[in-house]
Image (cartoon, grey):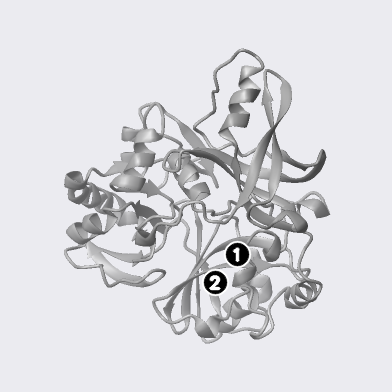
Amino acid sequence: MAVGTAFHPRTSALNRKLAWGDWAGYLSAQVYADLHDIEYNAIREQAAAIDVSPLFKYEISGPDAARLVDRVMTRDVSKLAVDQVFYTPWCDERGKVIDDGTVTRLAEDRFRWTSAEPSYRWFALNAHRLDVEIRDVTEELAALALQGPRSRDVLEAAAGRRFADLRYFRRRPAEIAGVEVDVTRTGYTGDLGYELWVPAGGALEVWDAIFRAGAPHGIRPAGIRALDVCRVEAGLILADVDYTGVRRAASPEQEHSPYEIGLGRFVDLGKADFVGRRALAAEAARGGPPRRLVGLELSWEGIEAAFARHGLPPAVSPVVRREPIPVFSDGAQVGRATSTTWSPILKRMIALAQVARRFEEPGTRLQVEWIVEGEPARVAATVVPLPFLDLPRRRT
């Protein structure tokens, strides 16, 4: 049975439609209104607050903390400065992705690690003979994503200090409503934004302060459906949708290396040995894996034609489609689209997809299956660079 997060007294009062989902055993608001369009617009045009507390959160500390982090993640811990954040995958010994998340260096010998799936046991197994402490702080630490072009204005008003100099993927402690919070310049929307890491006991005070400060800036609570559209526009993958972690994979086809899901740039083969390094080095030496993550732009004319064959106007769901859709070239299936959505800001139907390596170049013409009234049609699609939406304000 799912339980509420530390912010639940506020999110439940706002979620009048009772549109809840289960996220890692927590109640997660899918949408606060009839549709998520207003929430999406808040993220892209004003400011939005998203409860991301269900993320698994671990604190790793001790003399050998850096050694453990370096042993597990694919990136080089020696390049991670105090008050900096790394996004990274981590793999099993075969180079297959277990999960992906963020690692924040809180001090020379202390780190905060977030993940989508439980990771305590994996960290503990790899901590053999290391002088390190691993704490699961998921329940102790609430998390609020403050996202959108006016998120900085809201944060500065709530905290009473400037944040314009906090660089992308950096961290800074702050105080909001008398509560000590940790602020990172991170997010899952591809927009300007911050994530606030809040002691659970002070979560409501921080929520109220953020919404008081955000009222002049049009702040709104946003649910998972709006967040989902934004992350696809930003070309950001989702575990168990765009890839399957090895612990959930039921077949070798469902397992993925970082190079297959667009995370190859986060693999540092030149650093100290880490779990999966040999397998990943061998894969890189072979020229990489046979399938790659790409962006697809679907032909709207093709979608219209598929509906017109049944005398229907085109009707597409505003919710991200998370079921795999076959991708074809010359009648042969060459991949699958994993996350498909209408982008309100780009006015296009877009999809994240995995395709055979020879089809990864931008400009490649493919077809995507589109079913109307039970009849499959082939809609033209073009491979395009990721991300679909690249907002300079995300980094500035």
Residue on which disc 1 sits: 120
The front one of 181 and 171 is 171
Residue type at tag 2: Ile
| Residues packed near mark 1 inside 10 Å, few (<14), some (14 to 19) or many (20 plus) | some
Residue on which disc 2 sits: 134
Q: Reading the chain from its start, which is encountered first: label 2 or label 1?
A: 1
**SS at badge 2:** strand
Q: Position of residue 221 (x, y in %)?
A: 33, 41
Which quarter of the picture shows residue 260? bottom right
The front one of 329 and 116 is 329
Q: Position of residue 128 (x, y in %)?
A: 68, 79
Instruction: Report whether 1 appears left or right of 144.
Output: right
Residue type at tag 1: Tyr
Instruction: Report whether 110 appears left or right of 157.
Output: right
Which quarter of the picture shows residue 13? top left
Q: Position of residue 323 (x, y in %)?
A: 66, 37
Regarding residue 194, the answer to whether it shows in the image is no
Disc 2, disc 1: CB below 8 Å?
yes
